[in-house]
Amino acid sequence: MTSTVSIRTVGQLRVFQEKQPLIQAFLREFGTESVVVLFMFGYSNKLSEDYEILCGLRALRIVPFVQQFLPMSGIPTRIPEDCLDMDFQHIAAIRFRSNGQNGEKFLRFVNKLFFGKHGKYYLPLLETIYLYNNKMGINKYLRRPDLLVREMPRGTRA
């Protein structure tokens, strides 16, 4: 049996953190791999907010099911212009439970935003994306070293 709820904002994460005794009861009842939170990204959060949510869920031992917000016709996303507001080495260090397929959706989204802003791919992020699945898929990027950066320039965030 699985229990599922959704979260999209840091404020919703705070509600979860305040209810930690209840969450711990759910974890005891259903097991640590069975309490799932639907985590929606790609609507209005900055990267640092998404990162805080993922780390907060991990600290609570809750499994995030990662899903990109796909707008309905006529309803645009509200991704802030400064959404890439943190150091990417922290994002590249994220490890998701199981084989990482679920988290790849989020990492690919971030990778696309990064490329859109810088015209290059952040290699440590690509290495995380291809860590578990389709390991040979990274080769299409490695064949284009002119499109890769391993380190962020000093004084910049994403």
Image: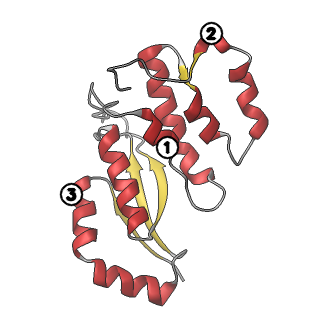
Measure the C-alpha gap from mark 1 to mark 2.
24 Å
Crowd around label 1: few <14 · some 14–19 · many ≥20 (10 Å):
many
Q: Which residue is mark 1?
A: 106
Disc 3 and disc 1: Cα gap in Å? 20 Å
Q: How far is mark 3 from mark 2, CA to CA?
A: 40 Å
Q: Position of residue 77 (x, y in %)?
A: 32, 35
Identity of the amino acid at label 2?
Asp
In percent of width and height, residue 19 lies at 25, 77
Q: Amino acid at mark 1?
A: Phe
Per the image, label 1 sits on a secondary structure element best described as: helix
- Circle nearer the viewer, 3 or 2: 2
Q: Nearer the viewer, residue 97 or 45?
A: 97
Residue 11 numbered tag = 3
Of the pair 69 and 21, the residue shown nearer to us: 21
Mark 2: which secondary structure? helix
User: Who is closer to the viewer here, 120 or 80?
Assistant: 120
